[in-house]
Each structure stands twice: as structure tokens, then as C-alpha cells.
Image: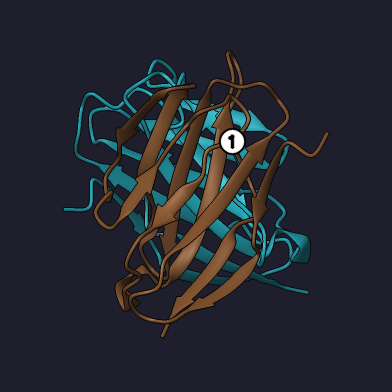
Amino acid sequence: QQQVKQSPQSLIVQKGGIPIINCAYENTAFDYFPWYQQFPGKGPALLIAIRPDVSEKKEGRFTISFNKSAKQFSLHIMDSQPGDSATYFCAASRDSGNTGKLIFGQGTTLQVKP
Amino acid sequence: NAGVTQTPKFRILKIGQSMTLQCTQDMNHNYMYWYRQDPGMGLKLIYYSVGAGITDKGEVPNGYNVSRSTTEDFPLRLELAAPSQTSVYFCAIQGPDTEAFFGQGTRLTVV
């Protein structure tokens, strides 16, 4: 059973576009929702994270929107650049982010065309 | 200060062989984790450790063993390699008030 479902599996946008990646979760005990960015041949790296007491968080061009009642959260990349081409994973945990015991989504491969 | 070092980077094993994936950290963090990454499946937690001498199972522990005799090292052991263990393995660390930090990964193929 996939506790965190991510979509789409892949995404292609033009430079300057706003790709949106969506995740849905089932376990209401989750209380920490990070997004990771992974480049080929590298490990995942934390991009941005949110806790369920806020509905939106922005860091630079990256924004997380969080809908607690719908149990959904999404990543928006503003003014996307070719350098943003990577695989993105949403994740969730029950430990307020205090441990690295994460449940990951399936991943979205993003390609930003110049 | 390398953070997390995983060795080897690549390995091909024959079915039934055994091997140990090494993970070493120089951050003195208590928490260490092993994840496996399969295409289209995201990452899944195999084992984790909250400190030297303490280990526990994650989501997919079958076929693997771990030990944590020191804070720095958290090796992952495959005793009887199977094709289903073909994957990319990531070690991660986490300290107080920090996020999980992943190593560069070990790509394992079992043939």
C-alpha cells in the first residue's frame, strides 16, 4: 500500500513555466512533509519542507501548498529553469521531522526545456 | 568534511553471493538510515539506527542485516543476493535540528 501517492510520474515544461507536482497521503498522523530534489547519480537533497499548521511555504522559486482537510500537498516551481531538471520526491513522516524515517512518493521526473 | 561516504559506488553480484555496503559519516550524528530506490517506486527504508548499538527494521528489511558498533559506521549486509535486491542504495544521516542528509548511493546489480 502506497501511503504517499505522487503525480505525475513525469513532466515537461518550457523555461519560465510553472510545473506543479502533487502528493496525497492517507495517514493523518503524518506531521512533516518534505520535498527532495535528486539529480542523476546523486542522492536526494532536501528542497523545502512544511508542517501541517501552515497552508503555504515559499523558499525562493519553490512553494509548497498544503491542504490538510484534503490530505494533499503540492510543489510549485516558479519561473522554472533548465537547471531545475531533476527528479522530485515528496515525503512524509510522523516524527515532526526529528528523524529521517520518511515515507516517499514515487517520484516525478521534471524536464525543463530551454 | 565529507558528510556521508558510501562505498562501493557500483557493484555487480551473482545470485547467492554476499556483500557489505559501507556507510561512514564524519558529522557525529546519532541517526543513520539505509534506503533503497527502485524505478517508479521512490525510496523505501530498509533499516535505521538511533545510536551506536541500536538498530531497528524499516519498511523493507527482509534479506538485509545491519550493525552499528560505532557512531561513524552503519554497514548494510546482504547475505544471499537475489535479483530482487538489484537497486540503488542510499545511506542517510540526521542530527538534532537538522534534516536527513543522503549519501551519493551504491548501485547494485544482482545477476
Q: How many marks?
A: 1
Which one is nearer the viewer's eye here, B26 or A83? Answer: B26
Which chain did the image draw in brown?
B
- Where is residue A7? Give x, y as percent: 37, 60
Residue A45 visible in the displayed image: no
Residue A84 visible in the displayed image: yes
Which one is nearer the viewer's eye here, B81 or A67? Answer: B81
Tell me what residue is drawn at x 67 percent, y 21 percent: B28
- Where is residue A107? Give x, y as percent: 44, 59
In this view, the residue farthest toward the right is B1
Task: List the residue tagged with mark 1.
Answer: B73
Which one is nearer the viewer's eye here, A62 or B93? Answer: B93
Tell me what residue is drawn at x 35 percent, y 63 percent: B41
- Where is residue A45? Give x, y as percent: 63, 44
Q: Is residue B76 left or right of residue A78?
A: left
Chain A drawn colour: cyan
Tell me what residue is drawn at x 32 percent, y 67 percent: B80
Which residue type does callout 1 highlight?
Asp
**Which SS class for mark 1?**
loop
- Where is residue B32? Give x, y as percent: 51, 32
